[in-house]
Image: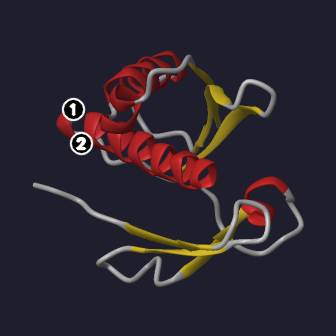
Amino acid sequence: MKRTAKAHWKGNLKEGKGEISTPSSILNQTNYSFKTRFDPGVVGTNPEELIAAAHAGCFTMAISAALTQAGITANDIETEAILDLDLVGLKIDGIHLDVKAAVIDGVSEEKFKEVAEGAKSGCIVSKALNVPITLSVTYK
């Protein structure tokens, strides 16, 4: 299986602009630019936001998969992925996954945290990233 995305850019770094598209058309000529990358008030996306979104989605699905394999159906699970971008070194320093889940009958908080830890290291996006990944769990 292969997944693809396309990016187009025109102009110099600071005044130029580009679009990102995916075959699913969820991203369809979605605007990105220097300003959308470094000025939080500008509408558009950026590569780091897309990495965080991919990580949050993958990790949350990995929790559901682990629970499903154990014969358990998850209630609500919500994850925020917080990517730490070092603007001086121009690198990603790490990603923190903050997961909040509704209690599942028959699943202790300790067991849920164990599943979340396994998902943190086992999700496909986590495996692709070469940065520290931390985790906090709220289970109630």
Residue 94, percent across and down?
Answer: 62, 24
Q: Is residue 100 above or below residue 21?
A: above
Q: Residue at the far front: name it.
A: 12
Under mark 1, the amino acid is Ala
Side of 125 where 72 appears, left or right = left
**How far apart in space, not on screen, are marks 1 and 2 (Cα)?**
5 Å
Asked if marks 1 and 2 touch (Cβ < 8 Å), the reply is yes
Under mark 2, the amino acid is Thr
Q: Is residue 25 above or below residue 119?
A: below
The image quadrant where one finds the N terminus is bottom left
Residue that label 2 marks: 68
Q: Nearer the viewer, residue 45 or 19?
A: 19
Q: Residues within 10 Å of mark 1 (few under 14, many from 20)?
A: few
Q: Nearer the viewer, residue 110 or 80?
A: 80
Side of 22 where 91 appears, left or right = right
Side of 85 where 99 appears, left or right = left
The image quadrant where one finds the C terminus is top right
Side of 41 where 113 appears, left or right = left
Q: Nearer the viewer, residue 2 or 89?
A: 89
Query: Residue 5 lies in what quarter of the image?
Result: bottom left
Tell me the element at label 2: helix
Residue 132, percent across and down?
Answer: 56, 17
Which residue is located at x 71 percent, y 60 percent? 13
Residue 6, percent across and down?
Answer: 38, 69
Which residue is located at x 46 percent, y 40 percent? 104
Q: Residues within 10 Å of mark 2 (few under 14, many from 20)?
A: few
Which residue is located at x 54 percent, y 55 percent? 50
Q: What number is the disc on residue 70?
A: 1
Residue 125, percent across and down?
Answer: 38, 37
